[in-house]
Image (tube, rainbow, N blue to C red):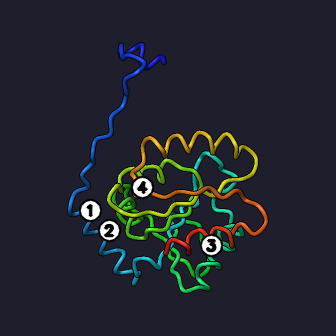
């Protein structure tokens, strides 16, 4: 409301409008080259974003990400991790933002802690079909879910399907089932 007052916008009108962002061709090509250089196959890759500030207690938790990666690797998927979280059998990348956006879109399956990087990936990949799952701890989950569902409904491309998985018993199996039903 304060923003509306400041901008002198009626309460019935939208304050923000979505504008398409063109990712330069050279960046798209570089991300595709990295994807190919890692010998990845579209539809058989899961991209993990293991760090964020919303629930920093999940950041790089080795046992959490190892358990999750195992679900996918044992079923023939490649797992790529954005950042430094070392998990056996996974490939790590750390790219500039726009290359990460394109690379993640090529992966199609994203499992992430809540983070602005994932929001950017989904918002800027409006052409790619993305299956996104957030991993969140039980404490604070209700508030988070309410806030993020509104955000995704209003600002994320129609091709992004998202789910939220609260960390509970058998969470890794549930996440795998959610992903595999879309593949």
Around disc 4, counting alpha carbons within 10 Å, would you say few (fewer than 14), some (14 to 19), or many (20 or more)?
Answer: many
Q: Are marks 3 and 2 in contact (CB under 8 Å)?
A: no
Q: Which residue is mark 4?
A: 121
Q: Nearer the viewer, mark 3 or mark 1?
A: 3
Q: Which residue is mark 3?
A: 177
Residue lying at 63% horizontally and 68% vertically, measured from the top left:
175
**C-alpha span from label 3 to label 1:** 33 Å
Q: Secondary structure at mark 3?
A: helix
Q: Which residue is mark 2?
A: 31
Q: Position of residue 72 (x, y in %)?
A: 59, 79
**C-alpha span from label 4 to label 2:** 13 Å
Rendered image quadrant of residue 27: bottom left
Residue lying at 52% horizontally and 68% vertically, measured from the top left:
81
**C-alpha span from label 4 to label 1:** 14 Å
Q: Are marks 4 and 2 in contact (CB under 8 Å)?
A: no
Number of numbered discs on residues: 4
**C-alpha span from label 4 to label 3:** 22 Å
Q: Position of residue 148 (x, y in %)?
A: 56, 44
Residue lying at 52% horizontally and 81% vertically, measured from the top left:
77
Around disc 3, counting alpha carbons within 10 Å, would you say few (fewer than 14), some (14 to 19), or many (20 or more)?
Answer: few
Q: Are marks 1 and 2 in contact (CB under 8 Å)?
A: yes
Q: Which residue is mark 1?
A: 27
Residue lying at 62% horizontally and 55% vertically, measured from the top left:
164
């Amino acid at each position: 409301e304060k923003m509306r007052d400041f901008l002198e916008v009626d309460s019935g009108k939208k304050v923000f409008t979505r504008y398409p962002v063109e990712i330069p061709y050279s960046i798209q090509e570089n991300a595709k080259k990295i994807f190919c250089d890692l010998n990845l196959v579209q539809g058989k890759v899961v991209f993990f974003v293991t760090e964020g500030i919303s629930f920093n207690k999940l950041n790089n938790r080795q046992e959490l990400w190892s358990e999750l990666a195992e679900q996918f690797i044992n079923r023939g998927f490649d797992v790529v991790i954005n950042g430094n979280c070392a998990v056996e059998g996974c490939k790590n990348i750390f790219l500039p933002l726009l290359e990460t956006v394109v690379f993640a879109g090529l992966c199609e399956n994203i499992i992430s802690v809540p983070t602005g990087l994932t929001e950017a990936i989904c918002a800027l990949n409006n052409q790619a079909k993305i299956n996104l799952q957030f991993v969140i701890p039980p404490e604070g989950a209700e508030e988070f879910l309410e806030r993020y569902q509104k955000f995704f409904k209003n600002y994320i491309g129609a091709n992004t399907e998202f789910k939220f998985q609260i960390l509970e018993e058998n969470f890794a199996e549930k996440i795998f089932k959610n992903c595999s039903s879309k593949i």
